[in-house]
Amino acid sequence: MHKPKVLITGGAGFLGSHLCDKYIKNGYQVVCMDNLITGNLDNVKHLFENEDFTFINYDVTNFVYVPGKLDLILHFASPASPIDYLNMPIQTLKVGSLGTHKTLGLAKEKNARYLLASTSEVYGDPLIHPQKEDYWGNVNPIGYRGVYDEAKRFAEAMVMAYHRFHNVDTRIVRIFNTYGPRMRTNDGRALPAFMSQAIRGEDITVFGDGSQTRSFCFVEDLVEGIFRLSQSDEVNPVNIGNPEEISIKEFAEEVISLTGTKGKIVYKDLPKDDPQVRQPDITRARSILNWEPKVSRREGLKRTLEYFKQVV
Ligand code: UDP
């Protein structure tokens, strides 16, 4: 039987590894490519015995070669948390720019469909709320987050150029804050920080006064949205995320109450250019993909806590 074949860059990362599972489950052969600078083989080791799964340790900022046919490329390789951008600014810029160029070249060569992992960070510290796909954003190009934001904005421009000039069949997903099992405990993001601190009985570090908002999507919902987008005809960017918005202080309080920790909230300086608000408008995903999130934050946080208890 002919099985479609997908290349997933960043396939050993948090989102990438869940996508490997999703496409295997849906009858694909999966080539997982990762240079493991933020990815972790533990995330995909359960797939090693699967004959439809191949792992290649490779940095996609170089010329990418994959033997045989390819039907789909999902470009998910990138450092993806604010402390990763601080520690790896040049790798972040390179994988969003050179890595996107190389993988688009591969898509053109193989006649494969291409899906770019873009981000709500293209909207920067948004002046429009909630964020719709037609908002152009408010990004500081030379700030600490600029290396990620501008790389992803460049990547979107490159994808549209390959689509318009080379007729590559492309998709762009703008991913909003996502959480779930396989996040790195030390990636510095709010949820892994809060859960690790709570499990260790340490204080919970809220940056600023905690009034800034985010909207958190459980990974299972996100991956379903991405799968549907990859099967759809939509070339324009599509927001995928959970529109349920919460302040970071309330989010910390939810983690405290769920874990029953003795840790208390302590307030630290707000990082520069930290967006004040963030909430996806998912009207487009609802109408085109017939998609919306199903997992409540209560349920998602419970399932995530089970994972963090094992790894912290
Ligand atoms: N944050 C926090 N404490 C932490 C880590 C993050 O208060 O230990 C805040 C951060 O300043 C931001 C929000 O939580 O306002 C979400 O941060 P995260 O790094 O998860 O992702 P972002 O949405 O900023 O990319």
Image: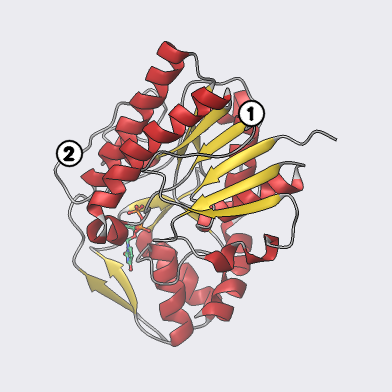
Q: Position of residue 20 (x, y in %)?
A: 63, 50
| Point 43% across, 87% down: residue | 201
- Kindly identify the residue that appears in the image at 38 percent across and 64 percent down: 190
Question: What secondary structure is marked by label 1?
Answer: helix
Q: Is residue 142 left or right of residue 102?
A: left
Q: Which mark is residue 141?
A: 2
Spatial CA span between label 1 and label 2: 32 Å
In front here: 153 or 262?
153
Which label sits on residue 62? Answer: none
Q: Residue furthest right?
A: 1
Q: Quadrant location of residue 293?
A: top right
What residue would you read off at disc 1? 289
Say which of 239 and 167 sits in front.
167
Q: Can residue 163 be seen by looking at this rendering?
A: yes
Residue 295 visible within the image: no
Q: Is residue 238 left or right of residue 121?
A: right
The quadrant holding residue 50 is bottom right
Residue 278: percent from left, percent from top: 37, 44
Disc 2 packing (10 Å; few <14; some 14–19; many ≥20): some
Residue in the picture at 37% in, 18% down: 161
Label 1 CB less than 8 angstroms from ligand 1: no
Displayed-image quarter of ligand 1: bottom left
Q: Of the residues shown, which amino acid type is indicated by label 2?
A: Pro
Quick one: label 1 or label 2, which is nearer the N terminus?
Answer: 2
